[in-house]
């Protein structure tokens, strides 16, 4: 499989290592320093593009890959205002796009556990719930895309919460997501249910970026045989 990396920062470099370990070829690498090489003709040379850039550039990068007619795997967060356009390109124009707010297999198990716990807690009185996330200081968006996914899944399964808010909830139908930025933390997400007498907490901590990179390469391999708008639920067969 021939891969183009769009974005060659912390994630792009980690993905390259895993792709090479899995005997895949990385033949193109694009970042802010070689934008002139990021052309449709060049993109046509690869089987798949893996995109990890920044919220402001992600959507334009996707559009370019669609023009080149190649599948894209993207982990960039903070671009979801354009989600319906991207889905439209897959559904109406036959494009293939794999998105995960978090490519770690462990986090995707955590997503499932979060939904099951929310469902269980839904029938129990006396608990309030909140989410916290901690990441390295270079992370641009807050709350993290992963925390937003956790919040949306929780709200869908826990009737007392109707919307999520940044930092502090004003009323108890709001689900607070608190964001912390510290050192080089790759990512910690915690869901905490608290009553007067106890609390129940589930948490996922990434030890490094390796888990995200492996998930992204597995997703790229998946797009060679599966088409359309794809997510980790398709890859993990949840
Ligand atoms: N989904 C996941 O599992 C997951 C995991 C980690 C990080 N992320 C997200 O991935 C993104 C990248 O993270 P990172 O830690 O690698 O960031 P980074 O800042 O280390 O790297 C970003 C790279 O993108 C490049 N870039 C910026 N604009 C570009 C453009 N217009 N065209 C081409 N390249 C461009 C930069 O040159 C840089 O190489 C962020 O949005 C982050 O939140 C997602």
Image (spheres, grey):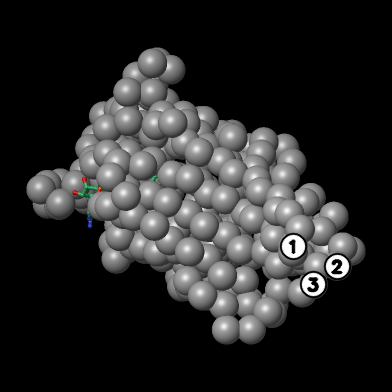
State whether residue 61 appears in this view: no
Q: Secondary structure at mark 1?
A: loop
In this picture, is 236 found above or below 89?
Answer: above
Q: Secondary structure at mark 2?
A: loop
In this picture, is 11 found above or below 24?
Answer: below
Q: Considering only order in the chain, which callout, 2 or 3, is on the residue closer to the N terminus?
A: 2
Q: Position of residue 144 (x, y in %)?
A: 45, 58
Other-residue count near label 1 (Cα within 10 Å), few / some / many at <14 / 14–19 / ≥20:
few
Q: Which residue is mark 2?
A: 125
Q: Position of residue 58 (x, y in %)?
A: 34, 59
Question: How far is disc 3 from disc 1 in space, using C-alphas?
Answer: 17 Å
Quarter of the image with the N terminus is: top left
Q: Position of residue 131 (x, y in %)?
A: 57, 60
Q: Position of residue 181 (x, y in %)?
A: 34, 55
Which disc number belongs to residue 93? none
State the count of labels. Answer: 3
Residue beneath the point at 89% across and 64% down:
123
Q: Quadrant of residue 235?
A: top right
Q: Which residue is mark 3?
A: 159
- Taking the image as shown, residue 139 lies to the left or right of residue 132, namely left
Q: Which residue is mark 1?
A: 195
Q: Considering only order in the chain, which callout, 1 or 3, is on the residue closer to the N terminus?
A: 3
Question: How far is disc 1 from disc 2 in space, using C-alphas?
Answer: 9 Å
Q: Considering only order in the chain, which callout, 2 or 1, is on the residue closer to the N terminus?
A: 2
């Amino acid at each position: 499989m021939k891969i183009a990396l769009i974005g060659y920062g912390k994630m792009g470099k980690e993905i390259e290592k895993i792709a090479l370990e899995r005997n895949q070829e990385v033949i193109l690498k694009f970042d802010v320093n070689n934008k002139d090489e990021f052309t449709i003709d060049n993109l046509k040379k690869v089987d798949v593009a893996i995109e990890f850039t920044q919220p402001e550039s992600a959507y334009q990068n996707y559009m370019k890959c669609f023009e080149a007619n190649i599948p894209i795997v993207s982990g960039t967060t903070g671009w979801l205002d354009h989600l319906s356009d991207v889905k439209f390109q897959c559904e109406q124009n036959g494009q293939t796009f794999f998105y995960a707010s978090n490519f770690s297999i462990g986090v995707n198990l955590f997503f499932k556990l979060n939904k099951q716990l929310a469902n269980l807690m839904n029938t129990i009185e006396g608990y309030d719930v909140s989410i916290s996330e901690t990441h390295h200081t270079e992370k641009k968006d807050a709350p993290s895309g992963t925390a937003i996914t956790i919040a949306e899944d929780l709200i869908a399964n826990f009737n007392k919460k109707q919307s999520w808010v940044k930092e502090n909830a004003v009323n108890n139908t709001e689900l607070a997501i608190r964001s912390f930025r510290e050192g080089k933390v790759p990512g910690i997400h915690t869901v905490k249910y608290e009553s007067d007498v106890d609390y129940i907490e589930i948490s996922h901590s990434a030890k490094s970026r390796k888990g995200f990179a492996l998930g992204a390469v597995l997703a790229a391999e998946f797009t060679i045989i599966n088409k359309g708008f794809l997510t980790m639920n398709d890859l993990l067969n949840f």
